[in-house]
Image (tube, grey):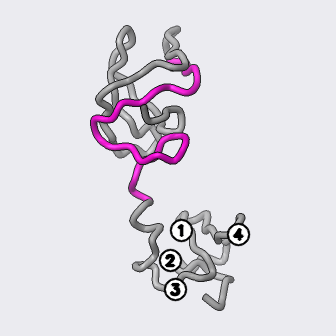
Amino acid sequence: MSDATNCPKCQSANIYFEGSIWTCPECWNEWTIFQTNEADSSPTTETDSRIKDAFGNILAEGDAVTIIKDLKIKGSSAVVKIGTKIKNIRLVDSDDGHNIACKIDGIGSIHLKSEFVKKA
């Protein structure tokens, strides 16, 4: 790619260079200078839909995860403690970032953000 002034996906001029990749904050497209200008052939379009844990491991339906941080439950005095193991997670599509649905003993059904879990 010879012209790094616009995003190859949405043509936005609001792009920035971070490490070794270019990032567009409007469409969250990431690319390197070695990739072609074709948005459909970009390898990042396939991985955007995958849900990853805090360490970059790809999560799947039915996986077991472990909580990596004490999480206060909003509207309750309950706390999910660090190290709590959760079995049989479900992956959900959510706008607010809570992309894991699960059931925790003593608390019940809740939704979690994948950034607070690690694959067990």
Q: Which mark is residue 29?
A: 1
For the residues bearing labels 2 and 3, Cβ distance under 8 angstroms: no
**Label 2 vs 3, first from the N-terminus:** 2
Q: Point out the image quarter for the C terminus.
A: top left
Is 71 in the magenta?
yes
- Please name the amino acid that badge 1 sits on: Asn
Residue 83 left/right relative to 17: left
The answer for how far apart the CA atoms under marks 4 and 2 are is: 14 Å
Give the magenta-colored segment's residue range: 48-73
Provide the residue designation for mark 4: 16
For the residues bearing labels 4 and 2, Cβ distance under 8 angstroms: no
Provide the residue designation for mark 2: 9
- Please name the amino acid that badge 2 sits on: Lys
**Relative height, residue 88 to residue 51 (above, below):** above
**Label 3 vs 4, first from the N-terminus:** 4
The answer for how far apart the CA atoms under marks 1 and 4 are is: 11 Å
